[in-house]
Image (cartoon, helix red, strand yellow):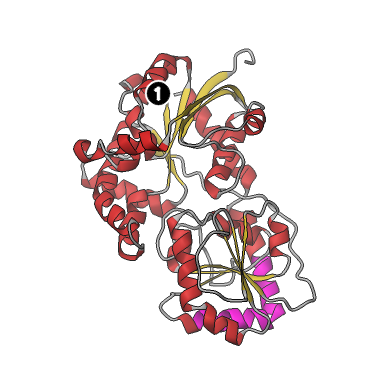
Amino acid sequence: MEKNKKKALLILTRAPYPEVDGTRKRMMDVIRGAAKDFSLDLLIVGDEKLTSQNRLFLEGFFGNIHVYFLRKVTLYFQAVRSFFSGRPLQTEYYFNKKVSSFILEKINEYDVIYLHTIRLGRYLELFDEETLKKVFLDLNDAISLNYHEAKKLAGFPWNLIYSFEEERVKKYETKLLSLVSNANVVSSFDERYLRSNCEKKGFSSPKFHGILPGVELHDKVILSDLPKNQIVFFGNINYPPNKDAVRYFVANLWPSLEAKVKNASFVIAGNGSESLRLPHSAGIKKIGFVRDLRDLFTDAIIVVAPIRFGAGVPTKILEALSYGVPVITTPIGIRGMVIDGEEGEFGIKCLDLKDSLVWVDFIDEIASNRDKREIMANAGINFIKKNYQQDVTREKYRAAFNFIANQ
C-alpha cells in the first residue's frame, strides 16, 4: 500500500472483470476512478467463481481480493428466509454469516466502504452509525420501478416473482437510503423516484452523487458499401428486460421488416443469445458475446432497443451511439437519459411499440436513406461527448470516494 493513501473496500456480488455487460463495465469505472487516490481491497460474495486469469487482472487494482463462493443450492436455501424476514429475496440470497463476521472484523481498516446494489443490504444493516457515514451505496437503478412494470409484461415465473417482490423491494430501498449518507443511481429519473419514496415515508434522502454511466469514445463506424442492412440487438440476454425485448421484436416486428427491408438480417449478440429460443427465420443470427463491438457494427444500419420494462440507463444504447450507430428505442429506453433537443438530434429515435408499423417504416427509411443515417450517427457521437464520457464518470467516482473519506 502506498504511504498515506486512504483505503477503500469494495463489496460486490460478481467479479467486475471480464467486462461482459453494462453492470461490470460500470464497476470497472468505479475501480479505475477510485484507484487513483485509494488503496483498494475487493470482497466478492456470490455464486460466480473467480478464475486465476481474471484474478491476475484484478490484482493490478487491488491489494487484497477475498472471494466467498457460495453454491447456488445454499443461496436458494438462504433466499427462503425472505418469506419470514420481509426482506427482498435477493437480499437474503446474498447474506452469509461467515461473510458478515469477516466484514465486521475488517471494517474499521477502511475510509470508504462501497456496496453495490440492495443485494448487499443486510450487511449494511449491521454497521454502526459511524461506519454508515463511510458507506457509499451504489444502487445502480431503482429496482422496484423495474419490477412495477415488469410484473405486467414478463413471462412465467418472473411475473410472479416481480409481483411478490415489488413492494418489499420498494420498502427496502427506502430503508437503506434512510441509513446511509451517500448514494448513487445512474439516472436522475430513478433518483427522483427514490427521493419521492423516502419523502413519503418521512425520511430525508442521502446525498446522491449524480454519477451517470460513461462509455469510451470511438472513431465512427463507416458502413461498408455492400447493402447488408443488418439490424442489431446486443446485450446480456440473461437479463429479463433484454430477453423480453428480443422476443417481442421477433414476434411482432421482424416478419414485417424481413418482408419490407431488402437484404435485412437481425443480428442478436451478447451473453446467452446463442441459446435463446426463437421462431426459425433465415434472417436471424444469434452470435453470442462479441468482444469488439466495432466488428458487430460494421454492417449495422441501426441498433434496436425495444425495451418494455426496466430502470436506469441501458448501456447498449450509449455504446451504439459512441460508435456512431443510430438507435431506435421506446420511452422506457430513454427515460433515464439526459435528453435535450428534438428527436434525432441525439442519435436516437423514440417510438412506442404499440404501433409496430411505425417502427418498421422508420427502420426501412434508415436502410434506404444513408444521409439521414449519417446525420443521426454524428448526432449520437456528439451526444455521448456532451453527456456520457467514460473519463468523466471515473473522475466523478474518484471525487465521491474522496468526499466520503474527508467528511
Pick whichever, 407 or 237, lies toward us.
237
From the image, give the main secondary structure of the stretch colored magenta: helix
Residue 270 vertical placement versus 73 (above, below): below
Whole-percent x, y for residue 202 in the image: 21, 41
Q: Residue at x 35, y 41 (%)?
A: 90
Q: Is residue 388 left or right of residue 162?
A: right
Q: Residue at x 67, y 78 (%)?
A: 372
Q: Picture quarter containing residue 175?
A: top left
Whole-percent x, y for residue 83 in the image: 22, 41
In the rendered image, is residue 203 in sight? no
Pick whichever, 354 or 47, lies toward us.
47
**Extreme right residue here?**
225
**Is residue 161 in the magenta section?**
no
Q: Residue at x 73, y 65 (%)?
A: 298
Whole-percent x, y for residue 248 in the image: 45, 71
* Region of the chain picked out in magenta, as a range: 358-379
Q: Is residue 355 left or right of residue 368?
A: left
Whole-percent x, y for residue 121 in the image: 34, 34
- What residue is shown with label 1? 99
